[in-house]
Image (tube, rainbow, N blue to C red):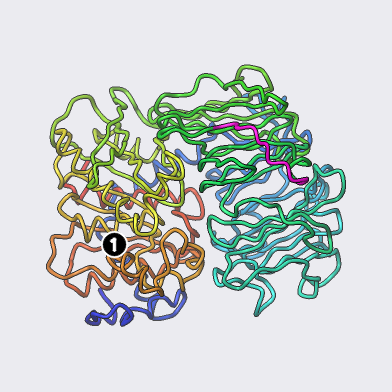
Amino acid sequence: MTIDARPTLAQPDDDPYVWLEEIDGTRATAWADAESALTMSRYGSATFAADRDTLTAILDRPDNVPYPARRGDRLFNLWKDARNPRGLWRTTDLASFRTEKPDWDILLDLDSLAAKEGEDWIWKGSITLPDDHDRALIALSRGGGDAVVIREFDLGARDFVQSGFHLPESKHSVAWLDRDTVLLSSPYGGEGMATKSGYARTVRLWTRGADPLVAPVIFETKLENMSVWAGPDRDARTKRIVFADKTGFFDTVRWIGDRSGPKRKIETPSDAWVSWHRGWFVIKPRTPWTVGGETHAPDTLLGIGFDAFLDGDRRFTRLFEPEPRRSLQGFFWSGETLVLSILDNLRPVFEVLTPSAGWSRTCIADMPEIGVASVWSFDVEEHQSNGDLLAAIQTPTRPASLFLVKQGGAPEILKRAPETFNAAGLVVSRHEAESVDGTRIPYVQVGPAGETGDAPVHMTGYGGFNISLLPHYNSAIGKLWLERGGTSVTANIRGGGEFGTAWHKAGMREGKRLSHDDFAAIAADLVRRGVTRPERIAAEGGSNGGILISNMLTRYPERFGALFCTIPLIDMRRYSKLLAGASWMAEYGDPDKPEDWTFLGPMSAYHTAEPVKPYPPILIATTRRDDRVHPGHARKMTAKLKTMGYRNVWFYEPAAGGHGYGKDNKERAAFTALGYAFLRGAVGWIS
């Protein structure tokens, strides 16, 4: 069933489906519900239901790792399972956490709260009052979107503070300044409070008992900039506030000041990553930076004393120097140390540096050759950290283990995640495909030994925003694809951060087309190597990966057997006018500039789609409560393709979920199981 199908028009601004952008419009939701029902009637089989229940049970397992965050001497965790689908916010101590069955103290039951208040509450995090940790600012979302309600919670009373800090729904960011003062960065308040991206344009100093609408504005940015933020610098000898003006997605101007506003600008390139802690300052520029008579290459990490830097000293110590396939993924402070997260030709490496004249360093051992490792500070508050780290290590065939890494010590196992699929006989291997310009594009393949030429392959990629996509332990892929004899592929295409800023920049703006070429090259390489044939390749991508998958449909249809396009951007003409879209113009370009539309237009699948092409079957899925990437992208692309006469186009839109696959474990399981049921059927592999 297709409601109000109309012929497409040639001009890019003649959009006959713009009515589908009315998120909760009666006509638009009737169309979305009807199309979703069609998809469920076709793919919502008994096999789908069994797969959904299997995945739900995996996500709800009582022996899953409860990842903790330490505040003071207590560990906090948000836990979800079958009895508590929305979650329990709970706390314990480290000694109890180490046991097989920790003694958890329940602070807040989200399911009970939602039932009591008749709201679709989804947990979006908490910020406890530093040092004391007896109060918290809790963020709750209706249906899982980015917009949240903020409510103050008393941890001792296990209840919300009736006369406390409360904010109605918006895209808030809040930070405790002291027990009776909050820094409020929020678009809440009406005209002039939001940037064009829909984020905070001002920072307000909000005191207990005051109306936030009349709280004094102490910092603001231009309407066209992305957002502002402020927070206390608790390491400072004096009470200092850090102000950040995010002028674009990759650019931030930083200031230090006090309760009256910013006083001193931190003189660094706006595109640099910077951090300071306990008297030390580090900076990583994204572009060449000439200062103090030296030019520092992009992605070089530089260190110096913070007071010396503020006084004008630019005699840095080089703490990390990039190589073509060795990149710094991030860094953070923990206790007296600086931790570097590095990818060395895609292998995770973690170096722990102790600031001094020589900056001594050690490495955290036992990282996988092919896999994912994450290291982070055990303590939420940097100023309270004693240097303890947490590490999670996994491979495509081995689930994550959680370790405690004490300063100077070997990793101590805390918890092991359960195995959720049978990995016997699976081989993990790395390969490289040659893209259209000769660049070698890595990918990791997991599957049975030996090449049959007919393997059902699941491919996934992202290629954007400097985000690295690495091969982790994926229960859904493992249970619904690999365990049944299939093969999976993780693509490291340009636009990601796997090899640093140069790799990212090669796949942004006009280079985004190359990112898509990379993915198609991997599909071709799988055929060349004798792994499979095109009609057996199923590809999945979400968000920025939705642009990728929609371009596989229109640019490389002959290389794929089926496509699963999720929470996607697709209409690159109007994306900057929809929800948070304006914030991504640094990544994609400005469609209102003719020079940018010359490269954006050819990768806007909504505009390049044509009738009577050999497009493979496609399922386009979104969520109604996604307030980051507008559900109109998915709706409009589906409507247009159906009007063109394509019969194997499917659509799915659950009512909640935010920018993800669902608001709870069962919804996420259903979203994934439906997608994989579609992909398996479309590539002729009903297993």
Q: Does the magenta stretch include residue 311?
A: yes
Classify mark 1: residues with Cα within 10 Å, few (<14), some (14-19) or many (20+). Answer: some
Q: Does the magenta stretch include residue 347?
A: no
- Residue at 76%, 40% in the rendered image: 308
The x and y percentages for residue 87 are 60, 48
- Residue at 69%, 33% in the rendered image: 334
The x and y percentages for residue 48 are 31, 49
- Count of number-bearing discs: 1
Callout 1 amino acid: Thr
**533 sits to left or right of 485:** left
Q: Looking at the picture, tell me which residue is in the foreground, 266 or 580.
A: 266
| Outermost residue, front side | 293
- Quarter holding residue 213: bottom right
The x and y percentages for residue 174 are 72, 58
Relative to residue 304, is residue 234 depicted above or below?
A: below
Q: Is mark 1 on a helix, strand or loop?
A: helix
Q: Looking at the picture, tell me which residue is in the foreground, 112 or 505.
A: 505
**491 sits to left or right of 641:** right
**In the rendered image, which residue does mark 1 sit on?**
39
Q: Which region is colored magenta? A: 310-320
Task: Check the picture and name the quadrant holding the C terminus.
Answer: top left
Relative to residue 557, is residue 374 depicted above or below?
A: above
